[in-house]
Amino acid sequence: MSTPEPRDCPRCGAGYDTLQEYCLECGDRLPTNRGTVGLLAGAWQRRFPWYPGDWIWPTLLFLAVALVATAVAAATSSSGAGTTIVATDANVAVGPGTGAAAATGQRTLPTAPKPTVTTGPLPKAPGAPSTEARVPPAPAGLTAWPAAGTAYTDVLESVPLASGRTLAVARARAAKAAGLPQAGVLVSSGYPSLHPGYYVVFSGVYGTSRAASAALAAAHGKGFSGAYVARITHE
């Protein structure tokens, strides 16, 4: 029969027998199991003065297993939260009043009406002067500009529309009284060759610019020092 191997108390280092339960020197409880539990108990007693007993190790193992299982369950649920479930069955029952377009999630949009295209002449903007309004009849005693064609004249003065037609007519009458030929007034907006926005006081209707230039000296001599030759064309 073999002799029991002596052991050392994990707390004070005193020797004890295999079946001894408490240390005879410090009174601490001795580890009786030399397996895994005994080794853990010895390590505990070397670090801490109080040892709860061997029951602590199964309890700690159970808690560790529970914590691991909880962590795995939480990770699995979080990874599956973003998963989209796609129905693969095409035979989906639809409610009353719905057809194939509703079953596929599509709608047929109404067709937009076709635009109406006007092929006739465009209407005039409200308040826009007509060609007839821009070519008023000549005042009594003054020359009216020809209704068609291209001609040259001596522009005596250009009176802004804001100053009024009365002033322009008075200047044309003064040119006629001074002896200048074919004095009259026209509205520049009706002629693309003139700058719009003026009543143009003119003298003479000439077929060439040379003839208009020859008469320009007389206009300067009658007090219209700013007179010049202009080509007048209709729209």
Image (cartoon, helix red, strand yellow):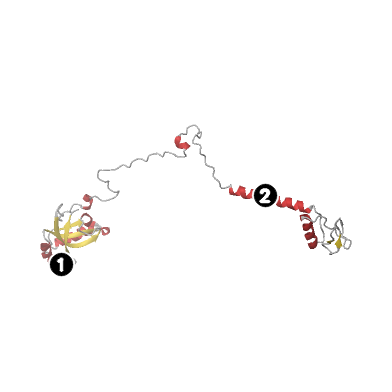
* Amino acid type, mark 2: Thr
Q: Give x and y (percent) for residue 191.
A: 20, 56
Secondary element type, mark 1 = helix
Among the 4 quarters of the image, the one containing residue 171: bottom left
Q: Which mark is residue 70?
A: 2
The residue singled out by tag 1 in the image is 220
Residue in front for this viewpoint, 209 or 74: 74
Dot 2 or dot 1, earlier in sequence: 2
Mark 2–mark 1 distance (CA, rounded to whole Å): 112 Å
Q: Is residue 51 above or below residue 122?
A: below
Q: How many marks?
A: 2
Q: Is residue 233 left or right of residue 40?
A: left
Examine the rendering and report whether any part of residue 179 can be seen: no
**How many C-alpha atoms fall within 10 Å of the one at disc 1: few (<14), some, or many (≥20)?**
some
The residue at the far top in this view is 96
Residue plotted at (19% across, 60% down)? 201
Residue plotted at (13% across, 67% down)? 217
Tell us which disc is closer to us: 2 or 1: 2
Examine the rendering and report whether any part of residue 155 can be seen: yes
Q: Which quadrant, please, contains the N terminus?
A: bottom right
Secondary element type, mark 2 = helix
Label 2 close to label 1 by CB (< 8 Å): no
**How many C-alpha atoms fall within 10 Å of the one at disc 2: few (<14), some, or many (≥20)?**
few
Q: Is residue 1 left or right of residue 174?
A: right
* Amino acid type, mark 1: His
Residue plotted at (61% across, 48% down)? 76
Q: Give x and y (percent) for residue 70.
A: 67, 49
Residue in front for this viewpoint, 10 or 52: 10
Residue in front for this viewpoint, 2 or 11: 2
